[in-house]
Amino acid sequence: MQTNEKKAVVYVTGIILVLIFGIALFSVLIDSTLPSYKPGREWTENDFNSFTENFKNRPQRDDFGLFATVISSVNAILFAYLLFNYLSVYFSIKSNFSLGLVVMGGAFLAQSIASNPFVHLFFGFKALGLGPFTIIPTLFTLIIAIVLVFLSRQ
């Protein structure tokens, strides 16, 4: 492995770890700012009726969540590959355009990690009932990832 490739691997690994830490920190901040129950009073089901009324009679199938998990995982792998390629290019030519590609690849990688429903569940959040709107954004991101991988291989 060349030194540029070793640097790229180290940077991609570091970026992924920083992104995961950032997602964890952000979810803790969001969770800490959500309203909590009033002292001396327990939560009852009536407190949540306005929010859950629409979902009580619907069957909760999470097939779209499974597809979104698979697609966003594929997106994360493709964008990690692209980030590795863009870092290798940046280390060899050191241009502003290649630095912009590195930033873009990092942003898409962060979006792919943050949009993964498995990551949402890991941090205690669950979104049910979104239907196909769960996978539509990740499908568009997958198209972008495939096009960018195709273009970077040429």
Image (cartoon, rainbow, N blue to C red):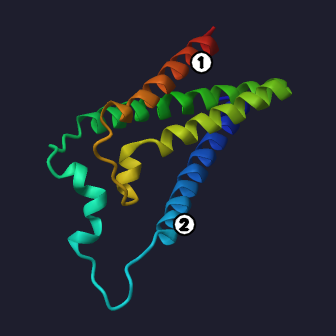
Seen at 48% across and 23% down, the residue is 140
The residue closer to the viewer here, 23 or 5, is 23
* Numbered mark located on residue 29 in the image: 2
In-image side of 40 versus 5 (left or right): left
User: Which is nearer the N-term, disc 2 or disc 1?
Assistant: 2
**What amino acid is found at the position of numbered circle 1 in the picture?**
Leu
* Numbered mark located on residue 148 in the image: 1
Q: Quick one: SS at disc 2?
A: helix
One can see residue 121 in this view:
yes
Tell me if residue 31 comes above or below residue 107 in the rendering: below
Seen at 74% across and 24% down, the residue is 89
- Asked where in the image residue 117 lies, by quadrant, the reply is top left
Tell me if residue 63 comes above or below residue 150 in the rendering: below
The residue closer to the viewer here, 75 or 45, is 45
**Outermost residue, front direction?**
50
Distance between the Cα atoms at labels 2 and 1? 33 Å
Seen at 30% across and 35% down, the residue is 131
**What amino acid is found at the position of numbered circle 2 in the picture?**
Leu
Pointer 1 local density, CA inside 10 Å: few below 14, some 14–19, many at least 20: some
